[in-house]
Amino acid sequence: MEYEIKPQKGLSLNLKELWDYRELFYFFTWRDIKVKYKQTVLGFAWAVLQPFIMMIVFSIFFGRLLKVPSDGIPYPIFVYSGLLLWNVFSTGLSGAGNSMVTNAEIIKKIYFPRLIIPVSSILVALFDFLMAFIVYIGILLFYQFQVSIMKLALFLPVSLLITIITTFGLGSLLAALNVKYRDFRYVIPFLVQLLLFLTPVIYPVSILKERTLQYIFALNPMTGAINLLRSAIINRPLDTDLFLISVGSMIILFITGLLYFRKTEAYFADIV
C-alpha cells in the first residue's frame, strides 16, 4: 500500500494534523530556547534584561532629554508596555522568517507539518514575554501606579493575540519567501529595525496631529495591539477607529502569509 502526503492548499491551518504532531511544538520550542541561552552566563535572565535595559535607554533619551509625551503616565511604564509586545513581534518575526532555512536539514529528511516551525519560533518569543511581564508588574509596583486589574486581564490577552497573529502572518510569509529568495535573510533585520520606528513603542499615536497620519499608522497591526494594552493602564477610552483598522490589517496579513506559505511549501524540501 502506498501513501501520498500532500501539503494543505488554500486558507487552512489543518488543525487536526497540527494536533497529531503536537509533540513537535514542544520539541522545536524547547530546543530553540536552549540554543538561544546556551553557554550564556546570565541564561534566561537575558529575556528580562534586554527589555529592561532598552526601557532605561529610551527613558533617558526620549523621556527625559527629548520630552516625548507618554499619555500622562511615567515614561518607563509607557515605553515598557510597548516593548513587551514589540519584543514578541520582533523576536518572533526574526525567528519565524529564518526558521525554514535554519531547519533545512530536518525538512529535507522527514515529513511533518511545516507550519510547526514558524509557530515554534513565535512560542519562543512568548516564553521571553512571560518573563518580561513579571518585571512589568515590578515596575508598576515601584511607581505605585494604579491599574484596573479587570481591564488589564481583558485587554492584555487580546493585544497579545493580535501580536501573535500578526507575527504569524508576516513571519510565515517571510519564511516562505526566504526559502526561495535568500535576500530576505538581510531584509528581515532591516525590516524589524524600520518597523520599530513606525510602531508607537517610544511615542504615542496622539503625537501625530493629522488624523490621516494616524489612520496610516493604524495600518500597522502592532499599533492597535500596543494602543489596546496601554488603554488598560491609561484612564482614556480606546480609539476604536484606529483599533479596527489595525485588526483589519492583521487579518489581511494572516490570510496573505498563510496562503503564500501553503502555496509554496510543496517545494521547500527541494530548494531549501
Image (spheres, rainbow, N blue to C red):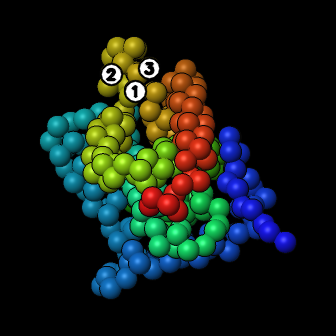
Q: Looking at the rendering, in which quadrant would you find the N terminus?
A: bottom right
Mark 2 — residue?
208
State whether residue 150 appears in this view. no
Answer above or below: position of 10 versus 249.
below
Answer above or below: position of 5 versus 12.
below
Disc 2 residue crowd, few under 14, some 14–19, many 20+, Cα 10 Å: few
Mark 3 — residue?
215
Identity of the residue drawn at 71% across and 69% down: 21
Q: Residue furthest left?
A: 65
Percent x, y for residue 118? 53, 58
Q: Quick one: 213 or 238, which is closer to the camera? A: 213
Q: Is residue 32 left or right of residue 157?
A: left
Percent x, y for residue 98? 41, 58
Percent x, y for residue 73? 38, 40
Q: Is residue 215 left or right of residue 151?
A: left
Percent x, y for residue 244? 58, 26
Q: Quick one: 38 or 186, which is closer to the camera? A: 186
Identity of the residue drawn at 70% across and 50% down: 8
Name the kind of residue labelled 3 in the image: Tyr
Name the kind of residue labelled 1 in the image: Phe
State whether residue 52 appears in this view. yes
Are the residues at dot 1 and dot 2 in contact (C-beta closer than 8 Å)?
yes
Name the kind of residue labelled 2 in the image: Leu
Q: Measure the alpha-carbon separation of dots 2 and 3.
A: 10 Å
Are the residues at dot 1 and dot 3 in contact (C-beta closer than 8 Å)?
yes
Q: Looking at the rendering, in which quadrant would you find the C terminus?
A: bottom left
Circle on res. 217: 1
Q: Is residue 52 left or right of residue 153?
A: left
Disc 1 or disc 2, which is closer to the eye? 1
Q: Between disc 2 and disc 3, whose residue precedes?
A: 2
Badge 1 element: helix
Identity of the residue drawn at 50% across and 60% down: 270
